[in-house]
Image: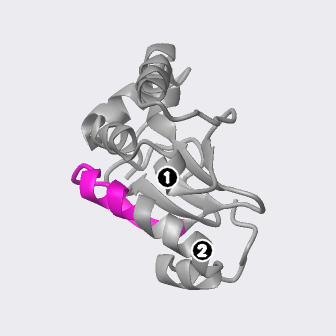
Amino acid sequence: MNTDNKSAHTVEEYLQSVPADKRRELSRVRRVILEHLPEGYEEVFAWGMITYQVPLERYPATYNGKPLMYAALATQKNHISLYLTGIYLSSSAREEFENAYRASGKRLDAAKSCVRFVSVDDLPLDVIGDEIASLDIDTFIEKYEQVRRKPLKMTG
């Protein structure tokens, strides 16, 4: 979660709230995400992060009534976090991502739910772009439903 400014309500407000050095890094990764993001996902400011999500209009049957997060970017005290939900939908997806990352020659600094970096130079942007592009919205929803224990009934 963003540790720099809790008062932002939009992506632009968030970007303006972070220090210039982090803003440059966030903007570079954001550009890669937007260039590779499949149609249907939306970019919003949610959860204290720049979030790429499935709109509720497209998939309202979430466990918490909030849109499904596909990816997100957030500044932390000492690094920036890139959340890639798709790599956690299966062990093979995570393994493929980790192998591609390591094959790039970059050192993977991954936590339980995110990739951490200080500089975009630490990221293999082609691997990040490929991961973002890897799941169209229908496939993401399908895989999400497969890992859920009990699908929720659609409302509305």
Q: Kindly give the residue lying farthest to the left in the view shown.
A: 39
Q: Residue at x 55, y 74 (%)?
A: 23
| Nearest to the observer: residue 107 or residue 69 | 107
Q: Is residue 139 left or right of residue 127?
A: left
Was residue 41 drawn as part of the magenta stretch in this picture?
Answer: yes
| Nearest to the observer: residue 54 or residue 107 | 107
Name the residue carrying label 2.
Answer: 21
The amino acid marked with disc number 1 is Asp
Q: Position of residue 107 (x, y in %)?
A: 58, 33
Q: Quadrant of residue 119?
A: bottom right
- The magenta segment: 30-45
Q: Quadrant of residue 13?
A: bottom right
Was residue 100 drawn as part of the magenta stretch in this picture?
Answer: no
Q: Secondary structure at mark 1?
A: helix
Q: Residue at x 59, y 80 (%)?
A: 20
Q: Kindly give the residue lying farthest to the front in the view shown.
A: 105
- Local crowd at mark 2 within 10 Å, few (<14), some, or many (≥20)? few
Q: Is residue 10 left or right of residue 131?
A: right
Q: Compared with residue 146, is residue 121 higher up or lower down, i.e. above or below?
A: below
Q: Position of residue 36 (x, y in %)?
A: 27, 51
| Nearest to the observer: residue 136 or residue 82 | 82
Q: Residue at x 55, y 52 (%)?
A: 65
Name the residue carrying label 1.
Answer: 121
| Nearest to the observer: residue 17 or residue 6 | 17
Q: Residue at x 69, y 83 (%)?
A: 7
- Local crowd at mark 1 within 10 Å, few (<14), some, or many (≥20)? few
Q: Is residue 118 left or right of residue 100?
A: right
Q: Position of residue 155 (x, y in %)?
A: 41, 47
Q: Kindly give the residue lying farthest to the top in the view shown.
A: 92
